[in-house]
Image (tube, rainbow, N blue to C red):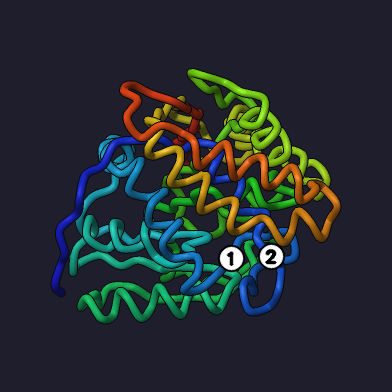
Amino acid sequence: MRMTGWTFLKGLFLVGLVSTSLASGTQEESDGAPTYHLRTGERAAAPLQQQHDMILSDLEAILKECGLKEGMRVWDLGCGTGTLTRLLAEKVGPSGHVWALDFSKAQLDVARATLQEDGYTNVTFVQHDLTQPFAIKEDQKGDFLVSRFVLMHLEAPKEAVGLMRDYVKQGGACLLMEPDNSRNSLARPCEQAQSFRKTLLEVGEKAGLDYSLGARLACLCEGVWQVKSVREKCYQNNATGTQKLWRARLEEMEEKLLASGMATQGQIDGWRHMIDNLSSKEEGWYSSALLYYVHGVKE
């Protein structure tokens, strides 16, 4: 199995993660679950890779601390286009195995194509809805599972956390990762930026979702997983990085916002003007956001 190198980037997870949920819901752009509004397939690959790269150095260290090692059998629940799947396949090596599960066929098609092209032979792809029980065979139960940026898109995240127990054997571990977007901040806030961020949170609320559940992620695990550690990480980005992410997200969400009546063309034009005028020469951080990591064990 051929392994590829990684670029270690530090940066911001930021509110841009949430804004992907505002993309147009046409079948061409998304074949995800009804409550999942992100684009899927090829059009989702670049933003998801960017988000992965921004937290990669922290994530590698945390996975190691949580006990991920060579030879393990791991489930990647809500694998998307396979960015995290690739990292897990590298870490467990040829003697280990990764099952990459997602609701979306388009996501799995991209993940399968890219990983197979790069020579990964220790990954199996599974299409399944995480909100439904899974008839997993005993010899498929893993030593470890990961779930990243998935629960925030579900109407009943507590129930999903419970169903996740079935994917690992007794004594197996999990690492769950979710944001708290209600506590995002800006170094130099302005009215347009504040309204942009506020609208993103309102979209989740309107759909009955919680785009800030990271802060209560450990509580969701109570009675299901024995929580071993909770990490709160603040990621920061400069104006250039913020501009790049926000511009991409606005392009994704414009049609959806207009169609739903959650924004006018004037508001969208104002946000675009604000984003275009973020200075690429500013030093230091411009925006920040919180990401929570919860490590648990099935006892």
Residue at image location 65% in from the left, 60% down from the top: 23
The quarter of the rendered structure image containing the N terminus is: bottom left
> Amino acid type of disc 2?
Ser
Q: Which mark identifies residue 24?
A: 2
Give the class, few, some or many, for how many residues have Cα within 10 Å of label 2's Cα (few <14, many ≥20): many
Determine whether 195 is above or below 92 in the image.
above
Question: x, y percentage for residue 21?
Answer: 64, 54
Q: Are marks 2 and 1 in contact (CB under 8 Å)?
A: yes
Q: Is residue 74 above or below residue 294?
A: below
Question: Which residue occupies the foreground of this view, 244 or 157?
Answer: 244
Name the residue tied to disc 1.
Answer: 39
Mark 1: secondary structure = loop
Where does residue 115 sit, x and y in percent of width and height? 30, 74
In primary-sequence order, the first of circles 2 and 1 is: 2
Residue at the spot x=27%, y=63% of the render?
89
- Tell me if I can see residue 267 in this picture: yes
Residue closest to the eye, 11 or 156:
11
Label 1: few (<14), some (14–19) or many (≥20) C-alpha neighbours in 10 Å: many
- Given this view, does label 2 or label 1 mark the residue nearer the observer? 2
